[in-house]
């Protein structure tokens, strides 16, 4: 069953936000070499088991909110479902080299979400 596999936290000050979440939830952050500061986030559940992973970078647009990414077996198949169910596609399927494929959609209630297909061979 498709489930949330990743979340993105936009931050006005990524270093300040990193310190906040480290102290609040004991989340672990790993800086990724990118032109602008970006961190991968490791979370765990209440029993210490690995939780949903996330990312955090500089806020791109005013009002940008937390985004959830749903893991699916095929981004193409799910983009067709989004269209058929009345949703919109705001970013077509895009390769994230060495990681997988991403698309961004809007549901019928104007909520933005991502579709994610893992594929280490993506180019």
Image (cartoon, rainbow, N blue to C red):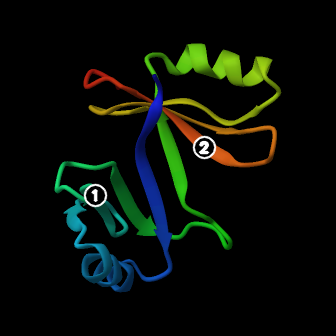
In the depicted structure, whether residue 89 falls above or below residue 72: below
Q: Residue at x 77, y 31 (%)?
A: 87
Quadrant for the N terminus, please: top left
Q: Residue at x 22, y 66 (%)?
A: 29
Q: Give the crowd class for mark 1: few <14, some 14-19, many >=20 residues within 10 Å.
A: some
- For residue 103, what is the image quadrant? top right
- For residue 62, what is the image quadrant? bottom right
Q: Residue at x 64, y 68 (%)?
A: 61
Quadrant for the C terminus, please: top left
- Residue 31 location (% of width, % of height): 22, 65
Residue at image mark 2: 113
Upstream in sequence: badge 1 or badge 2: 1
In the depicted structure, whether residue 42 falls above or below residue 95: below
Camera-side residue of 47 and 87: 47
Residue at image mark 1: 40
Q: Is residue 63 left or right of residue 14?
A: right
- Residue 109 location (% of width, % of height): 80, 45
Q: Residue at x 71, y 49 (%)?
A: 111
Q: Kindly check if marks 1 and 2 are in contact, taking CB atoms under 8 A apart as contact.
A: no
Judging from the image, what secondary structure is the residue with disc 2 in? strand
Q: Is residue 89 left or right of residue 21?
A: right
Q: Is residue 89 left or right of residue 29?
A: right
Judging from the image, what secondary structure is the residue with disc 1 in? strand
Q: CA distance from mark 1 to mark 2?
A: 18 Å
- Residue 14 location (% of width, % of height): 38, 77
Q: Give the crowd class for mark 2: few <14, some 14-19, many >=20 residues within 10 Å.
A: many
């Amino acid at each position: 069953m498709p489930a949330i596999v990743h979340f993105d936290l936009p931050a006005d000050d990524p270093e300040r936000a990193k310190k906040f979440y480290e102290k609040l939830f004991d989340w672990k952050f790993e800086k990724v070499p990118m032109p602008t500061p970006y961190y991968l986030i490791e979370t765990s559940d209440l029993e210490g088991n690995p939780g949903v992973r996330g990312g955090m970078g500089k806020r791109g647009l005013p009002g940008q909110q937390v985004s959830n990414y749903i893991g699916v077996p095929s981004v193409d198949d799910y983009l067709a479902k989004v269209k058929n169910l009345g949703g919109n596609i705001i970013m077509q399927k895009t390769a994230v080299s060495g990681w997988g494929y991403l698309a961004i959609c809007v549901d019928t209630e104007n909520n933005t979400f991502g579709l994610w297909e893992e594929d280490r061979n993506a180019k």
